[in-house]
Structures are given as structure tokens and as C-alpha cells.
Image (cartoon, helix red, strand yellow):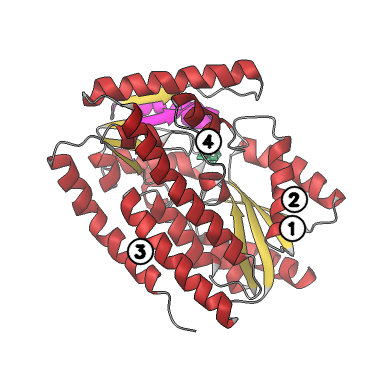
Amino acid sequence: MNELKSVAKLNEAFANRKDELYAEKDAGKKVFGLFCTFVPTELIHASGSVPVGLCGGKDSTIPSAEEDLPRNLCPLIKSSYGFKKDKACPYFEAADIVVGETTCDGKKKMFEKMEEMARMHVMHLPHFRDEASRKLWVDEVIKFKELIEEFTGNEITDEKLAEAIALENKERELFYKIYELRANDPTPISGKDALSFFQKSFLLSIQDRIEILTELVAELEERVSKGEGYTGKRILIAGCPMTAGNTKIVDLVEEVGGIVVGEETCTGTRKFENYVEGNTIEDVANRYFKINCAVAYKNDKRIDRIKELVKEQKVDGVVYYTLQFCHDFNIEGVLVEDALKEAGIPIIRVETDYSESDKEQIKTRLEAFVEMI
Ligand code: BJ8
């Protein structure tokens, strides 16, 4: 099987991204640093500004964070705080403003300390799915639009918003297509490569993303037409996001003979599912209100979606992955496990951090799981 050319192109675009981002800044564009997939990036694009995901997937900055924050805290929170404190993330350093959101308590409180190092805007995310909460979220998105306009001095016109919505929807369409192609057996892309596309999609420009993903789709279609790809026990990963730098669970699953065919995570389906249907701010808000994050809601819809993904991607077993001290995903994991067991779907729950110390132990458990299913 030939190497995917789009992977090389992705890596090249990533290598150039830092310089490109600083050039955009020099040209007067504002950079918005983002923590979460709830932030409606259409509004940032429509103002002529640049959204970029922030670093937070590596162990290396955690000791520095632990000088200020409790040790018993999610590694993603500590890692991202440490990246800012150590000035070790070029995207954090480029950000003129950092946008957070009231998801988990750890992040929410960490933002109060981060405010000493960065200009912050925190979006209030409701924790119910009812109509009152939807209205609150629409208001919050309108407030965010006003903040962007004031901060950048650029008006978000209806035309600019419609253009930005069309671009983001195009990227969503490509990711949907990639998932359809991954449903084939053999599946045309490894989980490791697929994760790399998701992780880097938070960093590259939207234009580059669309170009590279279009190329990827064509390459995967070719592989499918030739019956080329990867075989093995088909695994869906469900749970916490895998921020760039963190590939531990996907690597281990594929080392023990599994093949990852889907990710019910924010570096997976939660990033792209649901289109913005219409061209108003409310349409934008409504799309983001549908994200099935364990932190945000009582979440029957998430459980239903995991079951659907198992069918769509022809999954043999689910690896439910939680970062240490992520209470929301961990507790929701109990409900997911009960529901999947009832439906006869094999599931294993794995809790981990960014260190190497538990790798062998997790590998042994995953090996047994993959053999058993
Ligand atoms: S939409 S998943 S990106 S909140 S930081 S909750 S791992 S304890 S990241 Fe998330 Fe937005 Fe939801 Fe997605 Fe747990 Fe850690 Fe909190 Fe985390």
C-alpha cells in the first residue's frame, strides 16, 4: 500500500503553520486561542481573524503547572496551563485573546489563574438541554460576536458570516465522508493517521484544511476501490479529547492488533458532526448546542450516538477513554458502560494521563480485550 500523500502534505502545512500564523498577525489579523470545540469559530473567521487550538497534550509542561495548580487535576488542564506559563506553545504566544468556556470545574477555575497571564474571555455554557438553556446559549454567542467586533474593530456582516459558515460546513462534509470511507473493511486509514488529521485541523488555516482533506478523501476512495487498507478488531474510542501530543491510547490499540475506525471525542465526531443549518447567528449557536459533551449535559443523546457509531463503523468493541481526574467523562463512563453492555456491545474503560508509567499495564488490558472480542 502506498503512503498517503495527504499525510505528507498535512505535515508540511503544520511545519509552516507557526510562521504563517505570525505573518497573519503582522498583517494585522487578531488571533483567538481556543480550548474547546464549543467555541463558534465561524464568528472568528467572519471577523477576518484567526482561530487556533492551544497546546495541552504533553507531559513536559506539567511539573511547572503543578507549582501553581493541584497535582490531582486533569493532565489536559495542567499541561495547557504549563504551556502558557513556560511560554512553550507558539499558538498560545500568538493568541491576542484566549477563549475559554464554563465546561468542567477544573478548566473553569484554572481560567481564573490563567487570567494573570493572558487576556481571557469565558463563554457561559449552560448545563441543560432545555429551551431556556438554548436561549441562554444563543445570547452567549451573540455576546461573543459583540466581543469579537469590539476587540477586532471589524464588523461581522451577514455576507461574511455566510461565507464562514459555508467554509466550516465544507470541512464538516469532508470529515463525514472520511468517516463513511473508514466504515469499509479493510478500513482505508489507520487510527493513528486519522487522529493526526483531527489534531492538526485545530491548528491549520481553514483553507489548508479543506484542501488537504479533499486530497485525503480522494486517496481513501482510491484505496477503498482497490480493497486496500487495514484489518483487525475494529475499535471505536469514546471519551476525552486527544490534544496534539497525546496519541497514547490509539497507539496502544493499534500495537495490540486493533484498528481504530472512529473516535467519539472532540478530536473526532464531536468536532464535525451537525452542520450549521442556515446563515444566522442563532443557526450557528444551535449547531454548537448539539455537541454531546459529557461535561455539558445530562447526555442520553451521547449514549445513543455511541451506539449508532458502533453500527455505522462496524465496530467490534469500544475503548472508553478518560483522562485522570476528568470526573464528567469518568462518571458518564459508568452510564455508557451499562448501556453498551445491555446492548451486547463489548466495552473496556481506561483511565490514564500523559505519562509513560502505565503504558505496559494498559497495553496488557487492551491486548486481552482485543483478543476477547
Ligand atoms: S466539548 S470534551 S473540548 S469541554 S479539561 S472535561 S478532559 S477534566 S476537554 Fe472538552 Fe469542550 Fe467537552 Fe470537547 Fe475532562 Fe480535562 Fe475537563 Fe476536558
Q: Secondary structure at mark 4?
A: loop
Q: Is mark 1 within 8 Å of ligand 1?
A: no
Q: Residue at x 62, y 69 (%)?
A: 259
| Residue type indicated by callout 1 | Lys
Q: Closer to the camera, 202 or 357?
A: 202
Discs 1, 2 touching: Cβ within 8 Å: yes
Labelled disc at residue 277: 4
Relative placement, left or right, of 43 versus 307 is: left
**Secondary-structure class at tag 3:** helix
Between the residue at mark 1 and the residue at mark 3, the CA separation in whole angstroms equals 30 Å
> In the structure shown, which secondary structural element does the residue marked by tag 2 occupy?
helix
- What is the three-letter code of the residue carrying label 3? Leu
Label 3 near label 4: C-beta < 8 Å?
Answer: no
Residue 311: which disc? 1
Is the C-beta of the residue carrying label 2 under 8 Å from the nearest atom of ligand 1?
no
Q: Earlier in the sequence, mark 2 or mark 3?
A: 3
What amino acid is at disc 2? Answer: Lys
Q: Residue at x 51, y 66 (%)?
A: 192
Name the N-terminal-most of marks 1 and 4. 4
Label 2: few (<14), some (14–19) or many (≥20) C-alpha neighbours in 10 Å: some
Residue at mark 2 to residue at mark 3: CA–CA distance: 31 Å
Question: Is 4 part of what is drawn in magenta?
Answer: no
Q: CA distance from mark 1 to mark 2?
A: 7 Å
Which circle's residue, 2 or 4, is located before the other in the chain? Answer: 4
Q: Quadrant of residue 158?
A: top left
Q: Start and end of the magenta stretch?
A: 98-116
Residue 174 tag number: none
Residue holding disc 3 = 10
Q: Which residue is mark 2?
A: 307
Which quadrant of the view contains residue 367? Answer: bottom right
Sequence order check, earlier mark of 4 and 3: 3
